[in-house]
Image (cartoon, grey):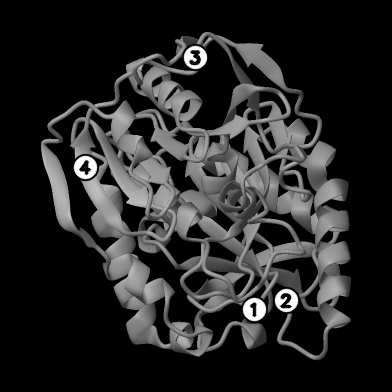
Amino acid sequence: MTELAYPAARSVAATVQAYFARNLASARQHGPKKLAPEPDAAAVEAIIDAAFWASLRREEGYSPKISLAFLPPEQAGEPLQFQRQLPLTPQVLTRLAPAVERPGIHLGVWRVPGDSTELRVWGTTREIPKLCFVLEVIEPGLLVIKYRRGQETGKYINVVVLKGDQIKVLDERGTTLPDCPDLLTSLLDFGSPTARTDSVNVLVQLAVSMRAHGRGGSLLVVPQGSAVWRESILQPVSYAVSPPFSELAGLMRQELSAREESTWQEEFIDAVDAIAGLTAVDGAALITDQYELLAFGAKIGRRDGGVRVEQVIVTEPIVGGMPAVVQPLELGGTRHLSAAQFVQDQHGSLALVASQDGRFTVFAWSPCEELVHAHRVETLLL
């Protein structure tokens, strides 16, 4: 029985093709580089369609988790190639999924020689060029189109998130509000073509790691050298750190050239995971905007004389997303409410909140709106 086409695949294919064409053309203007081939709309549609139906199947009781990369074998470093290439079908993808579900392994997909319309799965690879079209199956019905900008320790850049009949196209412009703090702007501009390709976005890596432990958690980012944040934390703090733990801060003070070394990259990931892991403890972890750890397990309280937070403005960095003013509890439970209260009392701070269900919100003060601004950013982190 032939499965029905997935309508969202055709709806988004031209948009995805235009996105990669635009960014690949821009990258070529900056000199010769090892760049990925440009995906056409038909290939994009076919890959999405096959991956979607594969995501709804089960193999020996498991839902498949697959990453597909659109490139020929000769652009894949030292790939593992099948003697006989396989058709791009949900059945094939489901059967191969157990062999490639570990992070960093992609199934390579490319055109049949002499036929620009038929696609085949040719093998697996761990190495892909910059701006390579990648589609990842996260869970049944949830797909993410993404690419690697080039930073080895960096997260992939998300382009589109597909969940059933929902299509979320990430906004290349990042933040659209004029009063975002610089630290938050760097997170929201993570997928922007104007972002530095050699930068390591610490907040993005911390957010990804916080989501990964699956327990939910809060991370408060406060100005370096300030002690005002203590007015919003119940005393005594169960797990205060003295002196501040500066492993991550020390790594980020090193020269850019050092960050290209594998040793630095491994140490960076370990340092990020160490701090993110502390957010699983009941209460909030606190770091400075220079990434020094001050405490974890801290309880947030309303500052003396502070006004109770009643409303927050909510946005999501997707094309067509509209701001909404809601009560903090509409975003989640007490963790979200306390984070919003902290930012209302501490305007120079940020609060990163991970929910157990995978949602992720960054709270910051908006002087223009005179409200706490809740940025829903899980679409950046999948």
Q: Earlier in the sequence, mark 1 or mark 4?
A: 1
| Horizontal side, residue 178 vs residue 198: left or right | right
Instruction: Identify the residue under disc 1.
Output: 129
Q: Is the C-beta separation of discs 2 and 1 under 8 Å?
A: yes
162 displayed left or right of 193: left
Q: Which residue type does callout 3 highlight? A: Pro
The mark found on residue 296 in the picture is 4
Give the mark, 4 or 2, whose residue is nearer the N terminus.
Answer: 2
Q: Amino acid at mark 1?
A: Pro
Q: Position of residue 229 (x, y in %)?
A: 35, 37
Label 2 element class: loop
Q: Earlier in the sequence, mark 4 or mark 3?
A: 4
| Mark 2 or mark 3, earlier in chain | 2
- The residue tagged 3 is 328
Of the two numbered discs 2 and 1 on the same chain, state the one appearing first in sequence.
Answer: 2
The x and y percentages for residue 92 are 52, 54
Residue at label 2? 36
CB atoms at circles 2 and 3 under 8 Å apart?
no
Question: Which mark is nearer the camera, 1 or 3?
Answer: 3
